[in-house]
Amino acid sequence: MLDTIYVYDAPDALGLNIGVVGQYLAELLPETQIETRTDFFTWQLGQFELPQVDMLAEQLAARLEEREVHDLVNPDLRADLSPVTPEERDLSAVYLAGSLQDVMRPLVPEAERGESSLHLAYITQCIGEFEAGQTLLRLRIVRHGEPTIISTTGFVEAPELPREYTFRRAQLLGFGMDAAAEELDESFAAQALGHGDAGVTRVAIGYALQALFHRLFGEESCADTTCPLHRARTHDELFEAHLSDQSALCDRHARMLIEARQAAGEP
């Protein structure tokens, strides 16, 4: 089992309460120390002496700027397609998930590294990957590793919208029925997670569970659509896995955790 889980806040993430996330993990793993912290970069820079902080912050800003994605079009296709900026998709800063993790990893203190520790860094920036055969960068919610990165903006932006919604909205706009399209948006809002919704913390807990099971057991997903470990590709699936009344660890994953705790001598 893990000795310590470090949970980093994303202060700008409306609706996120990492105190609740930490409490859930503490109840789930009573023998594991759970430590909640401010945002990842602020916390890690705070471990250095003041004369070093300004220099490190400047270096970090430069490294992050180098890794920011300004064109969402797959690099293999940019010669034939016009650029698509994050702003055109109403997105904030976007980073390749692996590149951002490469910037963050060296900041983790040596004493807090290794298999006995898990760092969960919630962020508001978007993360994604360019995939073969895909025209645009695919947004992701989580990037496992050290540290594990969880994008709260990804809760809203990464899952696909229902095809019926996108089809009907395109039809209404095509006929100039903007008011009807706005009504459709309002009715759909009840079926999709939005920025600042009360369910953000519950979803954040679900992705903390995914990080936990990935670290302990190498589990990537779950076929049970009501298990928080299910890899949700649409907003409907996100609701079912994290926010429905049936949402809970499936029997197999609950049993895995119980057996791991027993093997470690925990009650």
Image: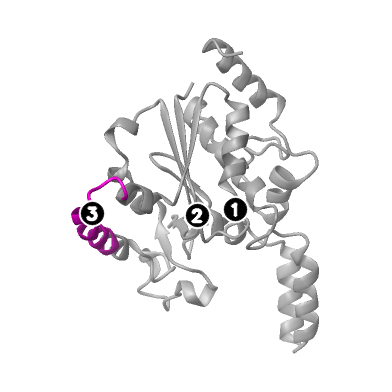
How was the colour assigned to the protein in this rendering?
one colour
Q: Which mark is residue 46?
A: none
Marks 1 and 3: which is nearer the front? 3
Give the amino acid type for the residue marked by disc 1 in the picture.
Leu
Residue 166 picture location, percent across and down: 70, 69
What residue would you read off at disc 3? 50
What residue would you read off at disc 2? 10
How far apart are labels 3 and 2 at the CA level? 23 Å
The residue depicted at 27 percent of the width and 34 percent of the height is 110
Q: Which residues are magenta?
A: 46-62
Secondary structure of residue under mark 1: loop
Do labels 1 and 2 touch, CB within 8 Å? yes
What residue would you read off at disc 1? 16
The residue depicted at 50 percent of the width and 54 percent of the height is 10
In reply to whether residue 58 is colored magenta, the answer given is yes
Residue 11 picture location, percent across and down: 51, 57
The residue depicted at 72 percent of the width and 63 percent of the height is 163
Q: Is residue 113 above or below residue 95?
A: above
Give the amino acid type for the residue marked by disc 3 in the picture.
Leu
How far apart are labels 1 and 3 at the CA level? 30 Å
Q: Around disc 1, counting alpha carbons within 10 Å, would you say few (fewer than 14), some (14 to 19), or many (20 or more)? A: many
Q: Nearer the viewer, residue 40 or 102?
A: 40
How far apart are labels 1 and 2 at the CA level? 8 Å
